[in-house]
Image (cartoon, rainbow, N blue to C red):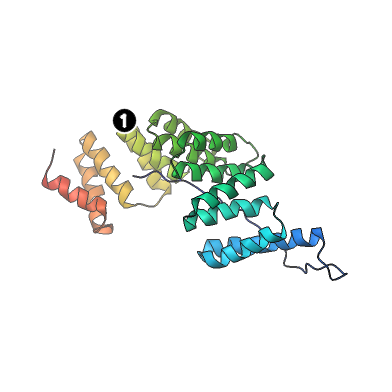
Amino acid sequence: MKPTIIICLAALTISLAGCASSSGRSSGADLARASEINLNLAVEQLRKGNLALAKEKLDRALEQNPRNAAAHSTAGVLYERLGETNKADSHYQRAIALDPKNSEYKNNYAAYLCKRGAYERGEKLALQAAKDLLYRTREAAFFNAGTCARSRGDLTRAGAHFRAALEVRPRFAAALLELAEIEYEQQNYLSARGFLERYMEVGRATPASLWLGVQIERALGNTAVEQHYANRLKTEYPYSNQARQLIESERNPG
């Protein structure tokens, strides 16, 4: 399974009040407030997947206040989705430069770096965010650090980061599944089973998780549970790649 990353969009709740000064001219405070309103609208459109309108609102927000760090971080997310990596990188870095203590901006940039193959830089930046005890989603930063480490093949460091994420949020489904996969890859099958069972209690059964269950129980020689996972995979996701892998493995055992 390809490692995933987590990006956070700021929850902006700016009041849509008037933004013009009594003189009819826009003051610095008015422009800053208008920038926040346009950013709020951009985030809403980005969440809906309306990238064109999100870009329009972000352009306006940055025109009104070029030092709006949140707008730069959000622009990084937008341009990443548009495939304009140079602009994405520039905006992520600008956000951190404007607000170097903001762990959300660091975590978002870390996620971007990991996806671009800059694993060591991404892991380091994610850990900076994760170690900020005031950051409300530290588990996401630990998770991203784990993803970076796993992507460059360091399963030991990856496992440590995913476990750290679980210390912050014990029922964090994504981290549980990652650890189940890592333990299976390292042939720690009982531990893999434990993490997968915990995942199944809090997460949604997917083709990847059901196929992993088949593989774990097959390695442990537990035919009954293996068949349970196999039947679910064939029934719930009959056209998935994992179902095809399962059928192929049954045709050619060993």
Q: Which residue is mark 1?
A: 186
**Location of residue 186 in the rendering, given as x and y in whole percent from the top left corner:** 31, 30
**Outermost residue to the front:** 86
Q: Is residue 35 visible?
A: yes
Extreme residue in the right direction: 23
Report x, y in % for residue 15: 73, 64
Residue shown at 13%/41% (left/top)? 253
**Quarter of the image where the N terminus is located:** top left
What count of labels does the image hold? Answer: 1
Compared to 145, does 23 lie above or below? Answer: below
Residue at the bottom extreme of this rendering: 24
Left/right placement of residue 63 relative to residue 46 reads right
Q: Nearer the viewer, residue 53 or 240?
A: 53
Q: Is residue 13 visible?
A: no
Q: Residue at x 52, y 64 (%)?
A: 51
Q: Amino acid at mark 1?
A: Gln
Residue at left offset 56%, top offset 52%:
76
Q: Dot 1: what SS?
A: loop
Place residue 199 in its image quadrant.
Answer: top left
Q: Position of residue 79 (x, y in %)?
A: 52, 55
Vertical relation: 249 (above or below) 128: below
In this rendering, position of residue 90 left or right of residue 14: left
Whole-percent x, y for residue 130 in the image: 57, 37
- Tell which of 195 and 165 is nearer to you: 165
Look at the image and tell me in which quarter the C terminus lies: top left
Of residues 204 and 3, the one drawn nearer to the viewer in this rendering: 3
Q: Within 10 Å of the Cα at label 1, are there few (<14), some (14-19), or many (20+) other Cα atoms?
A: few
166 left or right, relative to 209 = right
